[in-house]
Image (spheres, rainbow, N blue to C red):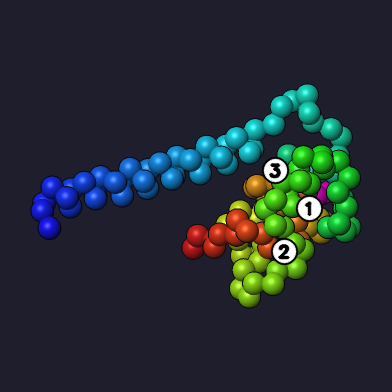
Amino acid sequence: MKANENSTRRKFISHFAGTSVALLGGILLMNSCESGDKKQDSPVSERGGDTISVESCNDYTGVSAEELDKRKKLGYVEKSEVPGSDCSNCGLYIPPTEGAACGGCLLFKGPVEASGHCIQWVAKAE
């Protein structure tokens, strides 16, 4: 193996990692941005999906059809079938605020069950 090939491989890995981080950051930033004229009065708070006064995590009042479609595309289910991988131990999960029954998610709006799961699950950083 030539030293030149090793250097090229290192450059590729470095560029790939940097591009991946930038892409993920851009997606999260774009997902968190919302047009001011789209906002509605709803029981969903500004933090992304925490519900304030909803007793059931099945109440999607005020959640747009677009956001409900996003949930479906991400494969969100209320009860995880993957052992050890549920919303409560996901790095994207937003714990419920005081007095709330449900948490939220950084990826989509609306109530989220702590026992739920989606395809974007990522372990919490320790």
Q: Residue at x 44, y 44 (%)?
A: 21
Tag shown at residue 116: 2
Comes first in the chain, label 1 or label 3: 3
Residue 90 or residue 120, whichever sits in front: 120
For residue 38, say whether it is visible: yes
User: Element at badge 1?
Assistant: loop
The quadrant where residue 45 appears: top right
How far across and down, in percent of the image, does residue 58 sit? 86, 57
Residue 28 on the magenta span: no
Tag shown at residue 47: 3
For residue 98, say whether it is visible: no
In this rendering, position of residue 70 left or right of residue 17: right
Q: Residue at label 1?
A: 111
How far across and down, in percent of the image, does residue 71 sit? 73, 50
Comes first in the chain, label 2 or label 3: 3
Q: Main secondary structure of the magenta part?
A: loop
Q: Residue at x 69, y 31 (%)?
A: 34
In this rendering, position of residue 116 left or right of residue 27: right
The stretch of residues the image draws in magenta is 47-52
- The span from disc 1 to disc 3 (Cα, nearest Å) is 11 Å
Given this view, does label 2 or label 3 mark the residue nearer the observer? 2
Residue type for callout 3: Arg
How far across and down, in percent of the image, does residue 60 sit? 86, 49
Residue type for callout 1: Pro
In this rendering, position of residue 90 left or right of residue 100: left
How far across and down, in percent of the image, does residue 19 sit? 40, 41
Tell me: residue 58, above or below residue 15.
Answer: below
Tell me: residue 19, above or below residue 101.
Answer: above
User: Element at badge 2?
Assistant: loop
